[in-house]
Image (tube, rainbow, N blue to C red):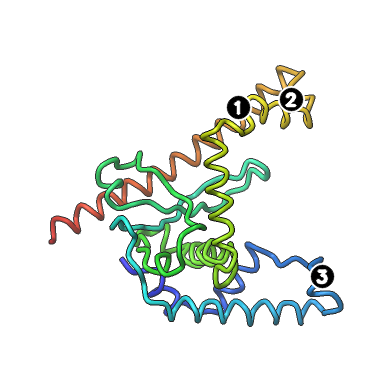
Amino acid sequence: MKTVQQYLKELDWDRLIDTYLFEHPFEYRDPALAGLTVSLIREKYTEGMRKFIERLCGLTPKDDPDGRVGILFAHRCIEVGSLSGTEDYCLVHADEVLSDGVDAKTYAYEFTDQSEIVGFLVADSGYTSRHIYGLMADVLYQASFFGYKQEGLAEALEDLDRSMRDAEEGNVQTMEEFMEECFSKYDFERNDPEEQDLRNTVLKAAFDYNEHFKKKELALLSVALRNLETEE
């Protein structure tokens, strides 16, 4: 399996940037873009993305502090809002795939240092390989979530620590309060049992669909990791 950084060095950057901008369109309403034409805005974003990719390619990969090996993979999924087929991109830890198989947990990684992200391995299953540009575009999105140089990461981590302390002290909104707030915007779902049942049926079907394909890819990854262990 190759690392994120190896793929970034090998892929066609123009195609990768096009994929990124298709998945994450730029905001025309950004005040910083006022007065610019669409072509100039795209040129500005493209230049920024190329510099960002160059930065990631130049980083020295750093191991996870806990010594865990991160692996990224893609799987087919369905978006409830559109009911159209798409892909989801996941991070798992190799040791958990080996121990838990298809039930291995997946993780968010936008809070992870870019030097660790570029060292993540990428599964070489057929599906992931066919959607490598989408997966790597997602990597760019996650790695730049707090800025191209993660300049906003420190503040975000402070906010996260503060939220965790609030949770420990009980100063957070309960799930019941959260659901009540959500449903208050959609009274038809709360007051009409038939409509709520239909919605729940759709949500469960989409969840089952996504879980099926995620576990399918995890099963393949588990076999690949065990084969690597055997070879060693």
- The tag earlier along the polypeptide, 1 or 2, is 2
Picture disc at residue 31: 3
Residue positioned 58% across, 59% down in the render:
155
Amino acid carrying mark 1 in the image: Thr
Residue positioned 52% across, 77% down in the render:
53
Q: Which residue lies furthest to the right in this view?
A: 35
- Comparing labels 2 and 3, the label whose residue is closer to the camera: 3
- Comparing labels 1 and 2, the label whose residue is closer to the camera: 2
Does the residue at mark 2 contact the one at mark 3 (Cβ under 8 Å)?
no
Residue labelled with disc 1: 201
Count residues near mark 2 (Cα–Cα under 10 Å), then give few for <14, some for 14-19, many for 20+. some
Q: Where is residue 205 in the image (x, y as percent from the top left)?
A: 55, 32
Residue positioned 29% across, 53% down in the render:
94
Amino acid carrying mark 2 in the image: Glu
Q: Nearer the viewer, residue 28 or 65?
A: 65
Task: Check disc 2 and report its element: helix, strand or loop.
Answer: helix
Count residues near mark 1 (Cα–Cα under 10 Å), then give few for <14, some for 14-19, many for 20+. few
Q: Position of residue 59 (x, y in %)?
A: 42, 77
Does the residue at mark 1 contact the one at mark 2 (Cβ under 8 Å)?
no
Please give left or right for residue 12 compared with residue 82 in the image. Answer: left
Q: Quadrant of the N terminus?
A: bottom left
